Amino acid sequence: MDTAGKDGAIRHVMSGVSPQGIKVWSFKEPSAEELQHDFLWRTTRRLPERRQIAIFNRSYYEEVLIVRVHPEILLKRELPDELVDEKTIWTDRYRSIADFEAHLHRNGTHVIKFFLHVSKDEQAKRLRERIDSPEKNWKINNSDFHERDFWESYMHAYEDCLNSTSTKYSPWFIVPADNKENARLIVSQVLLDWFRGLNLEYPKTTEIRRQELASFRDKL
């Protein structure tokens, strides 16, 4: 939800990572070009290269969250009429997402997903801070208040989505986000544990390589 602290979490948690190996992509309302493709297309284009990290600030999950809460948006997606069936479209999209993430896992890309869970009262507090602090006024607009009217619908959509798309190879981590510092600490720990599980290490020197290095020294 808005004000959950996504931008701050990215900035603080990843501050110790070399910018040469990381890219952050923020996904807003789809462009005219993106609407001409399936809902996974625009994020697929931003997948990381080998040995790189990509952070998606929002993602294809918007298409089973905000679009589910506001199904009239589906009419703008230019889908074939027979596919716009609210009884099946969300289940179908959950399956597409799970299949997509399983495909990435089978091909060496790890997908880790965080849901920063802010309470409605805490969101109201943060919105008031944005109103009262001139340096934060730019962060607020009418949609922030409009979407609060659909809070229960969003909670239902999140619950259904998380239960349907959290898997062993691509888990969701639900992070209590009312305390920003604690939320950032949790995200940091999850990532550290995940990286350690990859058993990353520098290449080991072989005897042939040591001989090569010795020859380099002889040339100095």
Image: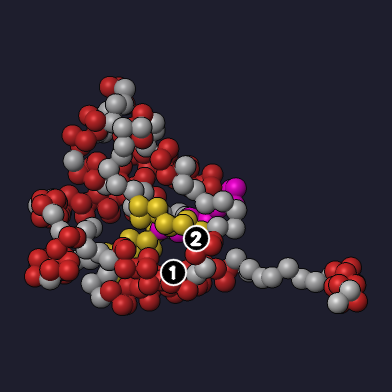
- Quadrant location of the C terminus in the rendered image: bottom right
Q: In the rendered view, does 40 fall on the left or right side of 121?
A: right
Can residue 207 be seen here? The reply is no
- Quadrant location of the N terminus in the rendered image: bottom left
In the rendered image, residue 134 lying in the magenta stretch gets the answer: no
Q: Which residue is mark 2?
A: 22
In the rendered image, the residue lying farthest to the front is 220
Residue pictured at 32% horizontal, 77% vertical: 182
Residue pictured at 36% horizontal, 29% vertical: 36
Q: Which residue is mark 1?
A: 14
Asked if labels 2 and 1 touch by Cβ distance under 8 angstroms, the answer is: yes
x and y percent of residue 45 in the render?
Answer: 47, 42
Residues in magenta? 106-113
x and y percent of residue 150 in the render?
Answer: 13, 50
- Main SS, magenta region, reads loop
Three-letter residue code for mark 1: Met
